Amino acid sequence: MMLVGISFLVVALDQFTKFLILHSLQVNESVPLLSNVLYLTYDQNSGVGFGLLSNLGSVIRIPFFITVTLASTFFIYTYQRLIPHEKQMTRIALGLIWGGALGNLTDRLLYGQVVDFIDVRYNDYPWYVFNVADVCVTAGVLFLLFEFISWNRKKAEA
């Protein structure tokens, strides 16, 4: 139940923030929040992280992303059933990853691409633009990595 709840919250927050951006900015419009560091920039990404696979046609790209998301959904659902109840961090991590994947899939189904808007820069040097779903997937992967490292450390001590 925690997995579904976290995923739902991630999708809701992701889609709400994207709704605000879609109704506030034009494509490629940028608004500084913290000069030289953080901007709201409406960007569209037809690929995955860092624009990878964006050159594939939508006839291939959309079914590919649907398949990957459905496969990850099956994996996450199956894996979470095997997790001991006390491994709450792992369940949270999986909820973040699943919610992020579903948030970006929602964009692909609605718009044919993902809406990105969090623009982090260093001395006005642009980095990649991302969104709430991307942040949640990254945080979830980092939580899983932390859990894995902690588990290995405890196993080595025992």
Image: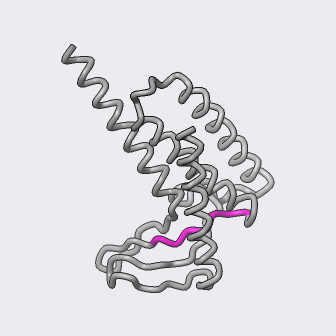
Residue 156 in which image quadrant? top left
**Quadrant of image for the N terminus:** top right
**Residue at figure coordinates x 62%, y 57% from the top left:** 104
Instruction: Spot the residue most to the left.
Output: 157
Based on the displayed image, in which of its 4 quarters is residue 74 positioned?
top right
Dominant SS in magenta: strand
Q: Quadrant of residue 45?
A: bottom right
Residue lying farthest to the right in this orientation: 59
The image shows residue 47, relative to residue 68, as above or below, that is below
Q: Residue at x 46, y 42 (%)?
A: 92
Q: Which residues are magenta?
A: 112-118
Tell me, yes or no, whether the highlighted magenta stretch contains residue 29. Answer: no
Q: Is residue 37 left or right of residue 74?
A: left
Of residues 136 and 58, the one nearer the viewer is 136
Q: Does 134 sit left or right of 26 as displayed?
A: left
Residue at image point 39% right, 71% down: 120
Nearest the viewer among 10 and 71 is 10
Q: Position of residue 101 (x, y in %)?
A: 59, 49
Q: Nearer the viewer, residue 33 or 44?
A: 33
Residue 115 falls within the magenta-colored stretch: yes
